[in-house]
């Protein structure tokens, strides 16, 4: 059991900018000359106010949109379109309701015309890793929101991506399910070892999960703070509030948001 081990990818982002054109032909600078390097196997969380360019950064890394300037390299290979080394999980699970859980997980394999039979065992192994052993023949409508999001994570992991991109993956879940998912994601990542870029509005989950938290500024999106989170693992969600370092990290991030008027103290 738990035979799956994935190798984390190295990520190198250099002078990356994204400028959108509005319908009125005005420029919107969503990202402004960002330089970042992620070591293989690092868990990086990104927090920032709405509209600061978090999803733009993720879409660029996923190869879903093109950069205006700059480059992205994954293990030294330039990225300009979706790549099997990169898995993506969005806030909405985007499962196809007419396909079973297993068929959903195997969808990327089918689309690429790879040998589905070869990946079936791996899909079942991933399901077991996220606590859904035996659910392969169920349909999405038979699962809870948290279970569906677990299936979406399996689908993202089916091709053993070195880089897992997650865009507010727990944003639509109730508080208890979110708590469980945060703990389970930590365990899964500790076993698998992928590099993760995790976008969230939650300062608490960013500090809890990450090795590194990037705090982004309002437009034009830049990295205001690059904070190393040095707390032993596995971290316990129910005990994290007893940890002084945790509070120090959260305070640092809040200080930035308060200084910029993004969070206003009363
Ligand atoms: N296709 C587009 N055309 C024009 N402007 C866009 C487009 N997509 C995003 N933007 C603008 O770029 C900026 C960054 O958007 P982005 O969605 O990356 O922010 P975000 O930090 O992910 O926001 P949120 O937290 O609300 O999801 C915003 O000002 C947004 O309005």
Image (spheres, rainbow, N blue to C red):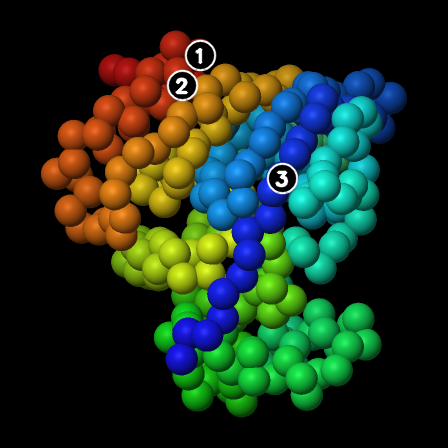
Q: CA distance from mark 3 to mark 1?
A: 29 Å
Q: Which residue is mark 1?
A: 260
Q: Position of residue 92 (x, y in %)?
A: 56, 57
Vertical position of residue 64 compared to residue 143: above or below:
above
Q: Secondary structure at mark 2?
A: helix
Whether tag 1 and tag 2 are in contact, CB under 8 A, the answer is yes
Q: Which residue is mark 3?
A: 11
The quadrant the N terminus occupies is: bottom left
Say if residue 224 shows up in the picture. yes
Q: Which label sits in the foreground, 2 or 3?
A: 3
Disc marking residue 164? none
Q: Which residue is mark 2?
A: 257
| CA neighbours of label 2 inside 10 A, class few (<14), some (14 to 19), many (20+) | some
Q: Position of residue 74 (x, y in %)?
A: 68, 44
Q: CA distance from mark 1 to mark 2?
A: 5 Å
| CA neighbours of label 3 inside 10 A, class few (<14), some (14 to 19), many (20+) | many
């Amino acid at each position: 059991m738990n035979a799956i081990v994935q190798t984390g990818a190295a990520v190198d982002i250099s002078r990356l900018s994204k400028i959108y054109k509005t319908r009125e032909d005005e420029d919107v600078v969503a990202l402004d000359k960002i330089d970042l390097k992620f070591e293989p196997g690092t868990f990086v969380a990104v927090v920032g106010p709405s509209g600061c360019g978090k999803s733009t950064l993720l879409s660029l890394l996923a190869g879903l949109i093109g950069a205006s300037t700059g480059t992205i390299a994954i293990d030294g290979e330039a990225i300009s379109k979706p790549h099997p080394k990169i898995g993506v999980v969005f806030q909405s699970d985007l499962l196809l309701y007419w396909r079973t859980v297993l068929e959903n997980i195997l969808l990327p394999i089918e689309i690429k015309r790879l040998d589905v039979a070869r990946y079936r065992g791996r899909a079942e192994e991933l399901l077991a890793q996220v606590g859904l052993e035996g659910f392969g023949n169920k349909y999405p409508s038979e699962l809870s929101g948290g279970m569906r999001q677990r299936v979406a994570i399996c689908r993202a992991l089916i091709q053993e991506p070195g880089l897992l991109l997650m865009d507010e993956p727990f944003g639509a879940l109730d508080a208890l399910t979110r708590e469980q998912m945060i703990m389970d994601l930590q365990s899964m990542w500790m076993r698998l070892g992928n590099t993760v870029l995790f976008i969230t509005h939650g300062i608490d989950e960013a500090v809890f999960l990450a090795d590194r938290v990037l705090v982004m500024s309002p437009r034009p999106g830049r990295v205001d703070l690059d904070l190393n989170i040095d707390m032993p693992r596995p971290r316990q969600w129910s005990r994290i509030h007893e940890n002084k370092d945790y509070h120090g990290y959260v305070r640092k991030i809040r200080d930035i948001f308060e200084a910029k008027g993004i969070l206003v103290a009363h």
